[in-house]
Amino acid sequence: MVSHVTTVAFQGIEAVPVDVQVQIGPGVVAFTIVGLPDKAVAESRERVRSALIASGLALPAKRITVNLAPADLPKEGSHYDLPIALCLMAAMGAVPADQLAGFSVLGELALDGTITPVAGVLPAAMGANGAGKGLICPAESGPEAAWASADMEIVAARSLIGLANHFKGTQVLSRPEPKIRSEGALLPDLADIKGQESAKRALEVAAAGGHNLLMIGPPGAGKSMLAARLPSLLPPLQPRELLEVAMINSIAGSLSDGRLSTARPFRAPHHSASMAALVGGGLRARPGEVSLAHNGVLFLDELPEFTPQVLDSLRQPLETGETVIARANHRVTYPSRFQLIAAMNPCRCGYAGEPGHTCRRGTRCAADYQARISGPLIDRIDLRVEVPAVTAGDLIAPALSEPSAAVAERVAAARDIQRERFADLGLAVSTNAQCAPSVIERIAEPDAGGRTLLGEAADAFHLSARGYHRVLKLARTLADLDGSERVGRIHLAEALSYRGAATALASAA
């Protein structure tokens, strides 16, 4: 007789059903796992054996065969421990097999029979709910699984004995409740920064429309400080965005105690990061920084110090909002719709163009340094602002900067306008930066003066088709910040001023 338990394999953030089949029959005493298991799955044989012994169950002295179907799908990870153990217990009569039929199971076993947390519980719960099944998972992952649905049955146990008692009815486990992680520390405030009014304005515009931003200035000008204060301007995640972010973090194993956070992700990898670390990959095709920054911010400090090939790997995610990792035997897609904020020095020595400074290499120092960033990548950045060194007068003067809360109110109002506009159009986007070119031409149609200015600027700046539409998106955001229904000449002029600055850098590239 063969017993069955359902579990999952992960392809990106998608949970693919896997049927665990166990047969206990006569023959040479053995415990075999088949179905393309990786090393972690093959080692589950010893964890399951020890956990069952610790729970008072001994494996029969027979031939035990475990098949993970479909057999041609690679099985990776330690979350197969619990489904294999439960399937064995069902085959031995220790738990009712019919009660397991309505559940999907995942969890790792310790040698003493306790169930330890695993990655991917939320996607597994979403998949189980879609298939009309419940979920059996580790107790610490229960709050994470509870977000999938308020109606699905979830059994979050701490041990194999607890699970056996639950199904026997002697000690019924209560359903876990979804939890939100409280953001303990206060975010850095924009009021801390003195001077840099033009950079603050660009930061507000970038936050309001989800636009990409590049800041160029000498060391110590405050570029990193400005970027660190962007999260304080951004609105919390919407429910749909929250689940998307949580599913990626669940696959990456970075959810703490199964608690979700409404704060938008802010990722700041070091410039020594490899391509696999930034866009995803590795042995198990894990999500990279661009996916972990989904619906949030990816901050790249010292932009030219990144390897040029690594930077160019950002071009597809910036354009399509997803990362495709192709391997010889499988293909994985992760959502990667992030906002790029970058900072860099104007040259290798860092002080090109600063008053009183003369570079020994002349203009070649800045040209060579800026040429490390390709033109196609620069073309995808909507705003580029100069961040000059702060003067002593700015530092000594009393702080009169606007706090983040006041700017965040304007950003939230502009985002509400965008969300309502796109909802009326039946589009599943929330910011102007995500809008398709055909739609932005309708919702950002400029007035007569604006059309004239845009035509002249397109010729003067040699705007690409992408650049033309990104100027319209930026102008639409500026109009939303002003509460204007129509994109005017003044909005296009400001948008082109940011784009015009970027044209100089693109020419260096």
Image (spheres, helix red, strand yellow):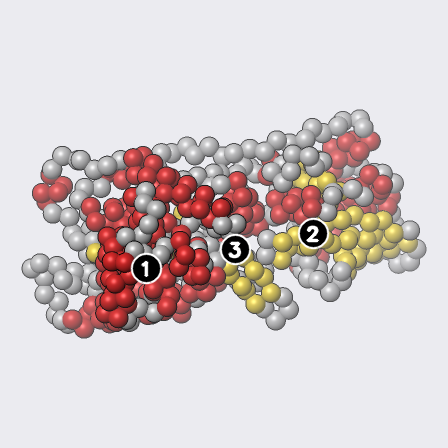
Tag 2's secondary structure?
A: strand
Q: What is the C-alpha distance between the residues marked 3 and 1? A: 25 Å
First in sequence: mark 2 vs mark 1: 2
Q: Which dot marks residue 261? A: none
Residue 84, position as x, y percentages in the image:
76, 49
Tag 1's secondary structure?
A: helix
Mark 3: give few (<14), some (14-19) or many (20+) Cα within 10 Å. many
Give the label, 2 or 1, closer to the camera.
1
Give the label, 2 or 3, closer to the camera.
3
Q: Closer to the camera, 366 or 129? A: 129
First in sequence: mark 2 vs mark 3: 2
First in sequence: mark 3 vs mark 1: 3
Q: Identify which amino acid the numbered label 1 is placed on.
A: Val
Q: Which dot marks residue 8? A: 2
Q: Identify which amino acid the numbered label 2 is placed on.
A: Val
Q: What is the C-alpha distance between the residues marked 2 and 3? A: 20 Å
Judge left or right: residue 377 versus residue 333: left
Marks 2 and 3 in Cβ contact (< 8 Å)? no
Mark 1: give few (<14), some (14-19) or many (20+) Cα within 10 Å. many
Q: Which dot marks residue 471? A: 1
Tag 3's secondary structure?
A: strand
Q: Residue placed at 41% from the left, 46% from the top?
A: 418
